[in-house]
Image (cartoon, rainbow, N blue to C red):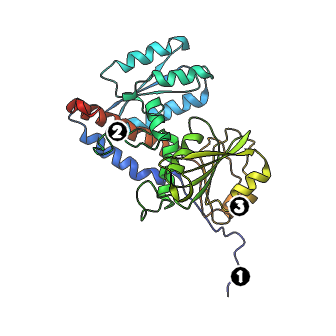
Amino acid sequence: MSAPNPQAKPGLTILASKISKPYIEDIEREVQELKSIRPDGPVLVGFLANNDPAAEMYANWTKKTSESMGFKYELRRIDDKDFLEEAIIEANNDDKVDGIMVYFPVFGNAQDQYLQQVVSRDKDVEGLNHVYYQNLYHNIRYLDDEKDKKLKSILPCTPLAVVKVMEYLKLYNTLLPMGNRMYGKKCVIINRSEIVGRPLAALLANDGATVFSIDIDNIQKFTRGEKLKYKKHHVEDLGKFSDELLKECCKDADVIITGVPGDSYKFPTQYIKDGAVCINFSSNKNFSDEVKEKASFYVPSTGKVTIAMLLRNLLRLVKNREYIKAHPEAV
């Protein structure tokens, strides 16, 4: 009998590059199929109106990735942020522009939420338009009649990327009907931002999961009710944040998802159930290396899946617009 290996770890680290590969291949194929109407590739315009090095890096990465896959990318720098709204409207009205994204934060307040709504619904690759958000929260998956199902609603890129990571890891039970495939799963999300954490909690709950949404102020439970009796998720406030309540939520959680934007934060490894899946979407490392001794799967970042979802959204917008041109009665 061989001696136990003290270096052995029970789980696997899965990289976003591996998960994104099949999506990238599909996207490249679809770009080629659109050559007859977009010979130079679909056009994505990014607006940069801040001096954030992280935004600059993301813009460069977006340009490199999108152009490598057959898209045309244009970065428009806005020196005076007060003119950003006019620049977005101009791009909205430009038939040569297929998709628009803005590198936030710009003003760092409610004005940013206003700017998100300035972007035309038909060109919003990030899925931040109020129509898309309303559909997400109400568990409506199409822009047209549910019977026709020709115009898919756009989902925010990072929440969608986390869902695709979870599908890759077989957390979604494909034997169950579409829309119920997370039934029986318990998830904890350490983030309740309006861009990622809250919509992600809603997405997973709408798919049948019980989701504990953790914020510095309180902890909420997202669920479609006992035996999925509701069509869309409902939210229950469990009380003020405390380590004890967090520990209780995590004790039988199948998935721990982190998105804390800070170098100092580390999720308590001792709260992770043996064999749980751990996913980090923050640009910071929210798990310590000990996570590999507890998790069955550990995904340290989701960036490459996120950019794949952004470009996938862009293709969907192109197809939606072309369908509406041919079938104006659809919307």
Q: Nearer the viewer, mark 3 or mark 2?
A: 3
Q: Position of residue 187 (x, y in %)?
A: 61, 54
Please say whether residue 44 is visible from this viewpoint: no
Label 2 vs label 1: CA separation? 54 Å
- Asked whether the beta carbons under mark 3 and mark 2 sit within 8 Å of each other, the answer is no
Residue 300, compared with residue 106, is above or below; it is below
Q: Amino acid at mark 2?
A: Arg
Circle 2 sits in a helix, a strand or a loop, which is it?
helix
Q: Residues within 10 Å of mark 1 (few under 14, many from 20)?
A: few
Side of 83 where 322 appears, left or right:
left
Q: Amino acid at mark 3?
A: Lys
The numbered disc on residue 316 is 2
Q: Residues within 10 Å of mark 3 (few under 14, many from 20)?
A: few
The mark tally for this picture is: 3
The numbered disc on residue 135 is none
- Asked whether the beta carbons under mark 2 and mark 1 sit within 8 Å of each other, the answer is no
The residue tagged 1 is 3
